[in-house]
Each structure stands twice: as structure tokens, then as C-alpha cells.
Amino acid sequence: MHIEFRPLKTSNCTEFKELLAIYHEAFPPEERQPDQVLQENVEREVSQAYIAKDASNVIFFLHAYSVPQTPLIFLDYAATHPSYRGNQISWHFSNRHFPCLETTGFYSANRKTPIMAKTVTPSRSASFILAV
């Protein structure tokens, strides 16, 4: 399976709608920000959205904020389409976009998804990543 990883520069596209479908499936309403907040933040470049696509569909997304005046990145949300879970897509994404990271051993409730990572190469742009 060929997977394309890339940032989304606008929320005004079909791919952002696909991202939102994964977002709604993966997170209960009480844990989500309103869609409009995500859209506005991406449009104003307050936050970044990244996607992974197979031949035709968005199969993974990550939403993150840079922490001003620090080398930190706050990972706000990340999720994989249900049909693609278990294929290590988030791991491949992290290795491609954050090759300086190694997981620290903190995991989500399912014990499969690392929720905290740190840099192993201090010269890289992100020195710490925390996902909630």
C-alpha cells in the first residue's frame, strides 16, 4: 500500500472534510473542539493539519500547534480511519515527519499508541511532543 503524507494548507478542500469524518468517529463530542475552530486555526495558520492518503482517501490525520517561543509542538489530535487501524500509519507518519523522536513508554489506554515522545537529536526542530 502506497501512503502519501502531507500537510493541509487549507480547510477548504475535500480532504479536510474527510479529516473531520475521521475526527468525529475517533473522538466523542465532549473531547472535540468545534469543527469551525479547527478550520479557522488551520486557515489562520495558528495550527497545522497533516494527513495520510492511500490512493484516494484520507486515512490518517494529525492536528498540532507550535508552542510560541519554544521548540515544542503540542499534538492536539491524531487518528486513523477505522479500516486502516493496526497498520502502524501513525508510526510511519512520525518517522517521516519527526525522525528525531523516540517513544518514552507512555501509552494510551489501548497500550498500543505512544502518547509521549522525546527527541534523541537535540538539533532537530521539535524537542518534545506530547499527545493528549
Image: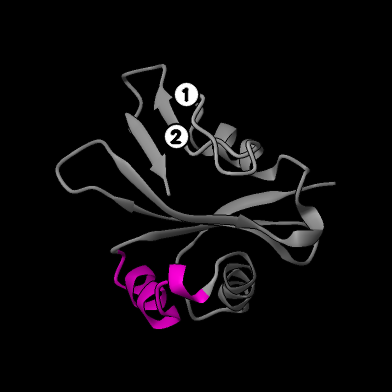
Q: Position of residue 8 (x, y in %)?
A: 50, 63
56 on left or right of 129: right
Whether 41 is among the magenta residues is yes
113 on left or right of 118: right
Q: Amino acid at mark 1?
A: Thr
Residue drawn at point x = 55 percent, y = 66 percent? 27
- Indicate whether 32 appears above or below 73: below
Q: Amino acid at mark 2?
A: Met
Quarter residue 96 falls in: top right
For residue 115, which numbered disc appears in the image? none
Dominant SS of magenta comes to helix
Residue 10, can we see it?
no
Residue drawn at point x = 45 percent, y = 67 percent? 31
Query: Within 10 Å of the Cα at label 1, are there few (<14), some (14-19), or many (20+) other Cα atoms?
Result: few
Query: Within 10 Å of the Cα at label 2, are there few (<14), some (14-19), or many (20+) other Cα atoms?
Result: some
Nearer-the-camera pick, 128 or 54: 128
Residue bearing mark 1 = 104
- Indicate whether 12 appears above or below 120: below
- Indicate whether 1 appears above or below 7: above
- Disc 2 vs disc 1: Cβ atoms closer than 8 Å? yes
Residue bearing mark 2 = 116
Residue 54, can we see it?
yes
The segment highlighted magenta reads 29-45
As helix, strand or loop, the secondary structure at mark 2 comes to strand
1 on left or right of 123: right
Q: Position of residue 16 (x, y in %)?
A: 56, 73
